[in-house]
Amino acid sequence: MNEDLIRIAEAVRSGVAAVPLSERGRILAMGADGTPTSHIDKVAEDIIIGYLEDRAIPLNLLSEEAGFLNRGYQETLVADPVDGTHNACAGIPFYNVSLAVGRDSLGGITEALVMNLVTGDVYTASKGKGAFLNGSPIRVRVPGKEMLLMAYLGAAAVPRTHEIASRFKRVRCLGSVALEICSVASGTADAFFIEYSEIKKSPRIVDIAAAVLILREAGGEAYGANRDILDMPLSLEARSNVAAAGSKAALELIS
Amino acid sequence: MNEDLIRIAEAVRSGVAAVPLSERGRILAMGADGTPTSHIDKVAEDIIIGYLEDRAIPLNLLSEEAGFLNRGYQETLVADPVDGTHNACAGIPFYNVSLAVGRDSLGGITEALVMNLVTGDVYTASKGKGAFLNGSPIRVRVPGKEMLLMAYLGAAAVPRTHEIASRFKRVRCLGSVALEICSVASGTADAFFIEYSEIKKSPRIVDIAAAVLILREAGGEAYGANRDILDMPLSLEARSNVAAAGSKAALELIS
């Protein structure tokens, strides 16, 4: 399965790179998730759908723009064709394609891939078999003196995000949820925090399915409201704020 | 002059790429600016010094680690060999080399180049001749509904940074001052804000010399304390907090 995920991601990377910056943000329609579909999202999703169809890959598809495509199989490919669409359209070099395979819910995801579409760096995981960056095993970091937080900030963030951010020596806000969670998995960051004041803007399963498996396989954990272990159905309707940590010390700082 | 700056930047990019991630952060000594010199900073600076010497380039050097090298010329190359050292060492793909040529002070800078060492994207400017990204003219953006701020956040940021950030729809904190200021120049962001609670941590001329000329040539402005037009001597001892804006509306949001 992972070979297919890598081939899909590489095809998306090539397809996205071929779209000039000035064309990327053109709004085409509203996606199945209720947010506008940019040209770049459509290009990337069409590549994914084409791959599944052309090679008769035995997977349904749940994707940001197309919604759920029931192709009659037991397992589903949960895809965010471009995570970090604003970055991709604005010329900020952080955005990724996020691909996960499983059934029923977040806990039922068994294969995951997140590819940075700028650098080509690729995070992968298979349930029970560890997590990898470009093929090398990755692991969450041991907390030290210089804690680093990846957080969502800006007008729609709950005010306590800022209080939490001020507890960390370093803060980054990169605008690409899956890559930020993967940076906790790889030990680049200690924690990730995203909490919108309106739940209707919070992450969906397509944004986080792959990254959360990668994080868990690297020794970290992802949490929802009230710091319960995060689970979500494979549906675009479910949304959840997300906190992710590589250690107990990091979890305390974001609680 | 710009041809030399581009060649230096390309040499730094190759040199940095050749250093494995695990080697980059090794601390060698204290730099002339009083901060520790990482292996990656030394590699990059040695490439710059070597270029000036081998080709007998008629410039003094003011650089983060080496300090001021008086080579007997009127003009000085103001260099930050790696801006965003933490990113470069931690595997966050966003860091740059920053090169500026001029005399006396920030206002006396006449040539500037900032290269993203990951993507190779290169911002350039010559005083009075406009600013460019990969050779195409760039311009600050007209403020719209979706304002984007680049800001320094984390434990050492003044508390009002968080209040300012909450006024913007989008916030990014990318950890590389020169690239963040250049993103205002190119119209990706509306404003940039960095204010440390301790002035001894604030940016120096090496961090901002190139980016500020690029910003000004693109139609923006950079400000210091009390929102006076920013100027600084060509010395590692001077530090200043920095606000940068592409429009009056953006300046109001960060004031």
Image (cartoon, coloured by chain):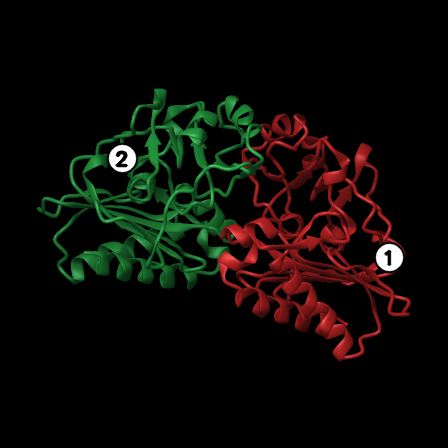
Chain colours: A red, B green
The amino acid beneath tag 2 is Leu
Q: Position of residue A91 (x, y in %)?
A: 49, 53
- Using the image as rendered, state which of residue A143 and residue B106 is in the foreground: B106
Label 2: chain letter: B
User: Which image quadrant: the C terminus of chain A?
Assistant: top right
> Within 10 angstroms of label 1, few (less than 14), some, or many (20 or more) residues?
some
Measured Cα–Cα span from mark 1 to mark 2: 55 Å
Evaluate whether label 1 is on the same chain as label 2: no
Q: Is residue B102 left or right of residue A183?
A: left
> Within 10 angstroms of label 2, few (less than 14), some, or many (20 or more) residues?
many
Q: Is residue A240 above or below residue A122?
A: above
- Using the image as rendered, state which of residue B118 and residue A198 is in the foreground: A198
Residue B194 shows up from this direction:
no
The amino acid beneath tag 1 is Gly
Label 1: chain letter: A
Which residue is at 55% across, 54% downward? Answer: A88
Query: Which is in the foreground here, disc 1 or disc 2?
Result: 1
Please name the residue that numbered disc 2 is placed on.
B236
- Using the image as rendered, state which of residue A163 and residue A186 is in the foreground: A163
Please name the residue that numbered disc 1 is placed on.
A108
Q: Is residue B79 left or right of residue A177?
A: left
Q: Is residue B54 above or below residue B190?
A: below
Which residue is at 83% across, 52% downward? Answer: A106
Q: Quadrant of residue B230?
A: top left
